[in-house]
Amino acid sequence: MLFTLPTHMGRRMRLEVRPQPSPFWSYVSPVLALLITVVIGIGLFMALGKDPVKGLQVFFWEPIKSPYALGELLVKATPLLIIALGLAVCFRSNVWNIGAEGQFVMGALAAGGVALLADKTTGRWIIPAILAAGVLGGMAWAGVTAFLRDRFNANEILVSLMLVYVADLILGYLVFGPWKDPAGYNFPQTTTFEAVTQIPRLMQGSRVTIGILLALVGVAALWLYLYRTYAGFAQEVSGQAPAAARYAGFSSRRALWVALLVSGGAAGLAGALEVAGPIGQLTPYVPAGYGFAAIIVAFVGRLHPVGVVFSALLMSMFYIGGELAQSRLGLPKSITGVFQGLLLFNLLACDILIAHRLRFSIPPATFVQGAR
Amino acid sequence: MDSTALLLAATLSAGTVLAIASLGLLINEKAGIVNLGAEGMMLCAAIAGFATVVHTGNTWLGFAAGMAAGAFLAAVFGALVIWLGTNQYATGLALTLFGAGFSAFVGIGYVQEKLPEQAQYPIPFLSDIAFIGPALFRQHPMVYIAMALAGGLAWFLYRTRAGLVLRSVGESPESAHALGYSVRRIRLAAVMAGGALCGLAGSYVSLVYAPLWVEGMIAGKGWIALALTTFATWRPARVLLGAYLFGGVTMLQFHLQGLGVNVPPQLLSMLPYLATIVVLVLISRNPLWIRANMPTSIGKPFYPGA
C-alpha cells in the first residue's frame, strides 16, 4: 500500500502496485494530463473573467484552422521537435541535460557567424555550412558538460544549466559588441543575413522550411537507433540499468558522451534553423525558451520518436495560443509558460497510473466486523 | 562612503539571498530530497512578496507571503515526490518551469510598481565606526537572520534529537522507519521548511536586494544555491561561507565596472555562473569525498513496507 486517502462512506482509496506496468496507461496518461491542464485552464480563464470558450479557441482551434496557421504551427514545432528528439536520447540514458537552451543559442551563434560571412557572390553551399556550424556549436557546448562530468564528476544538471546563462551572455556580448550592425542605429543586432543564407522554404506563402523535413528524418533515425540497432540498445541499458550495462561491458562513459553530443548537436541544429530561417539575424531575442519547453515535449512524448511529434505540435499550439491570448484576450503571453509547467506536473502525477492502480476498498476493520 | 566598504556591504546582501535559499535546500537534502524547483519557488515568492508589499506597505508581511508561497509550492512538490513517487529531478524541473511562467503571468501588472521607501536599520554605535560600520552594521535585519539561521541549523542538525531523526531519514530511511518514525511525513516537513526558506530568499530579492519586480529576476540564484549545498559538502557553516563567496563574485562585476575596468559587462556578468562551474568541478573531482559527505539516500524514493 503506497497511498491511502479516507473517502466518504467508510471506503478508502488506495494505490496498489501493478504486477506489470500498464502499456495502456502509458499512452493514456499524457492525454489525461492534457485534459486536466485544459480543465485548470478553463478555471483560470473564468477566474480572470475571460470567456473560456474563446480561451480554448485561441489555443486549440485558431492554430489549426487555416493552411497558413498550420504552417505557423509547424514553424514553431520544428525546433521543439528537433531538440526533444535529442533530449529523448539523453533522458533515456539517464543523463540530465537541462541546458538545451544554451546549446540552442551556441548553435545559433555558430550558424550566425557562418551566415555573416556570406556576401553577394556566395553560392548555395553556404546552407549546409550553416547547418553544420550549428550542429558543431551545440555539440561543443554540450561537450563542455560531458567533459566536466566525465573527467571531474561535476553534476551535469547544474553545469548544463549554468552554461545556459553563459551562452546567453556570449550572445549578448557579440550583438552589443563586435558583431553589432554598424548601420543598425545602435540596435543590439547583427546585419540581416544575405538572402542566400535563408534556409529554403517548402512552399510559397508559408514560413515552413526544410527544417521540418530534417526533423522528420530525425524521427526515423531515432526510431531506428533506439529499436533496431545494438548501439541504441546499449545506450538505453547504460541509462536504465547501469549495473547490467557494466556486466554486459557497455561503457557508461560512452553513453554519457553520446547522450550529450547527440542532444547538443540537435539543439544546435535547431538554433541554426531558427536564425537562418524565421529570424534571419542574431538578436538578444534568439533564446525563446525552446530548449526548456523541449524538456516538456520530450517527457510528454514519452521519450518516443513518434510521441514527441505529437507533443511538439501540442507545445507549439501552446506558444501560438499564448501569443493570440495576448492580442485577442489581453492576457500576458507568459500564460504559455503556466500551461507548459502545469502540463508537465500533471503528466508526472498521471504517470503514477502506469505502475499503480487505484483501488476503492472497505477498510480492514469494517471488513472483519462484517464477517462476524 | 568608502567603495570597499560598499562592496563588502553589497556582498553580504547578495550572499544573504544565496545563504537563506541554500540552507533551505540543505534541510531538504539532509532528509534525502533534491528539489530542483528552487528557482521556480524563489520566483513565485519574489512576486508574492512584492505584490503583498505593494498592497499593504508592510515588508515583513511580504516576507511572510514569500515564505507561504515557497512552502505551498514545496508541499505540492513534496506530495508528488514523496507520496506518489514521481522522479525528483523531473518534478523539480516542472516546478521551476511552472514557477517561471506563473510568476511572469501574475507579475505583469507589477512591473512598473515601486515599493515604499525602505526602512534603514543602523545598529546604534556600531554603525558609526569608520569602514566597519557601513560595511557590516547598516544591513537589513535579514542579513543577520541568515547568519543566525546557519548557526541554528547547525545546532539543530547535530545537537538535537529531531535533527538526528531528520538526518537518519536522509541517510537510511529504512532504519528510521523501523524505529517507528514516519519517514514520509518528516520528509514532507523538511521539504516545506526548505520551500519556506527558498521563499524567504526569493522575497528578499524583490523586496530588499533589487528592490523591484521583473520577469525571471532570480536569474539562476536558485540553481547556484543548489550547487552551494554540494560545494559546502552539506555543512551549514560552509553554506554560509560559500554564499558570501558567491555574493562577492556577483558584486565584483559591478565593482569592477565602477572602477572603470574595460571589460564588456556581459563577460563580467558571467562570473557567478562560471565560478559555480569551477567550484563544482573542484569539489566533485574527488568522488570519495563527496560520497563520504553526501546524505546516502539523497534522490531515492522510499516506500514504507515495500
Image (tube, coloured by chain):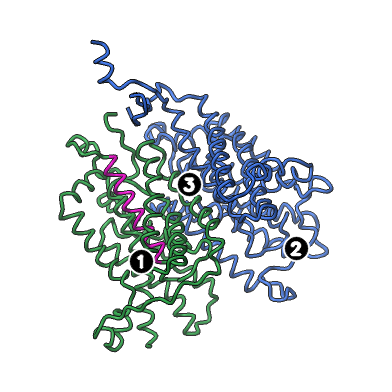
Chain colours: A blue, B green
Mark 1 crowdedness (10 Å alpha carbons): few <14, some 14-19, many ≥20: some
Give the vertical position of A311 relative to B286 (above or below).
Answer: above
- Closest to the observer, A352 or A49: A49
Q: Label 3's element?
A: helix
Q: Position of residue A68 (x, y in %)?
A: 78, 45
For image coordinates 33% across by 20% down, the residue present is A362
Specify the amino acid type for callout 1. Trp
Q: Can residue B250 be seen in the rendering of this structure?
A: yes
Q: Which amino acid is tagged 3?
A: Ala
- Mark 2 vs mark 3, CA separation in Å: 37 Å
Tell me the element at label 1.
Answer: helix
Residue at the spot 47% in from the left edge and 24% down from the top edge: A22
Q: Which residues are magenta?
A: B184-204
Q: Nearer the viewer, residue B28 or A272?
A: B28
**Which part of the image, by quadrant, shows the C terminus of chain A?**
top left
> Percent position (x, y) of residue B261?
50, 82
Mark 2 or 3: in front is 3
Q: Mark 3 sits on what residue?
A: B94
Q: Quadrant of residue A82?
A: top right
Same subunit: marks 3 and 1: yes
Q: Residues within 10 Å of mark 3 (few under 14, many from 20)?
A: many
| Residue denoted by label 1 | B60
Judging depth in this view, the residue of B86 and B127 nearest the camera is: B127
Magenta-drawn stretch, dominant element (helix, strand or loop)? helix
Q: Amino acid at mark 2?
A: Phe
Please identify, in this view, whether the residue under mark 3 or under mark 1 is nearer the observer.
1
Residue A98 higher or lower than B212, as above or below: above
